[in-house]
Amino acid sequence: MVPPFGLGQYERMETRAIQDRIRDNYCWGCGADNPTGLHLKSYWDGKLAVAQWTPSEEFAAGPRHFLNGGIIATLLDCHGVCTAIANAYQRESRGIGTDPEIWLATTFLSVEYSRPTPIAEVVELTAHVTDCDERSASVECVLGAGGKDRVCATVRTARVPPEWRHGSSESQPR
């Protein structure tokens, strides 16, 4: 698969999506293993992550020609978390998805909608890490469509242990 946006300014992009390298990713927004999810695919160049996603009419807001805000927030959240995961692997000088696995979860999401997102346009996302350490990361994301920025978000993440991610009895809410 070729990364979105063709080549040109994104020549250094990985050719395999971040989400396709994460094992057992059942996330509804970006999980390759969830058959009914959105299947967002983000590509990483070491500093920037990009993605494209094509909406369909089932994801409409009240006005049928605009994309639902919850879908937009999900796309930004997933793109941000996957960017933080790619960055964490890079900081450890390892390939994405190699053992021991790294997983980060959202601890904060701020979404600022500046203009409606037309449902008939391909959505383009960009993200970059603004702050990070071995346990957490902050990511700034932008969602655009039709050549205009539509929504921006801040995603903060925290590293979680494998037992949290894989559902051990100790990771379940009490």
Image (tube, rainbow, N blue to C red):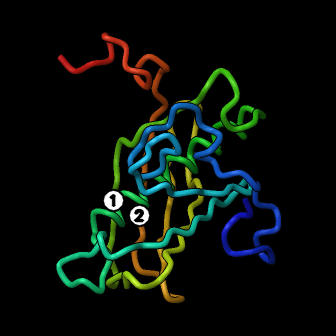
| Residue 33: x %, y % from top left | 50, 40
Picture quadrant where residue 27 is located:
top left
Q: Which residue is mark 2?
A: 153
- Which residue is drawn at the image coordinates 50% and 61% (left, top)? 140
Picture quadrant where residue 101 is located:
top right
* Figure quadrant of the C terminus: top left
The amino acid on which the numbered mark 1 sits, given as a three-letter code, is Ser
Circles 2, 1 touching at the beta carbon (< 8 Å):
yes
| Residue 9: x %, y % from top left | 77, 75
What is the residue that sits farthest to the top in this orientation? 170
Q: Which residue is mark 1?
A: 110
In the image: residue 163, left or right of residue 128 = left
- Which residue is drawn at the image coordinates 49% and 54% (left, top)? 39
* Figure quadrant of the N terminus: bottom right
In the image, 109 versus 53, the foreground residue is: 53
What is the residue that sits farthest to the front in this orientation? 35
Picture quadrant where residue 73 is located:
bottom left
Circle 1 crowding by C-alpha within 10 Å: few under 14, some 14–19, many from 20: some
The amino acid on which the numbered mark 2 sits, given as a three-letter code, is Ala
- Which residue is drawn at the image coordinates 69% and 55% (left, top)? 44
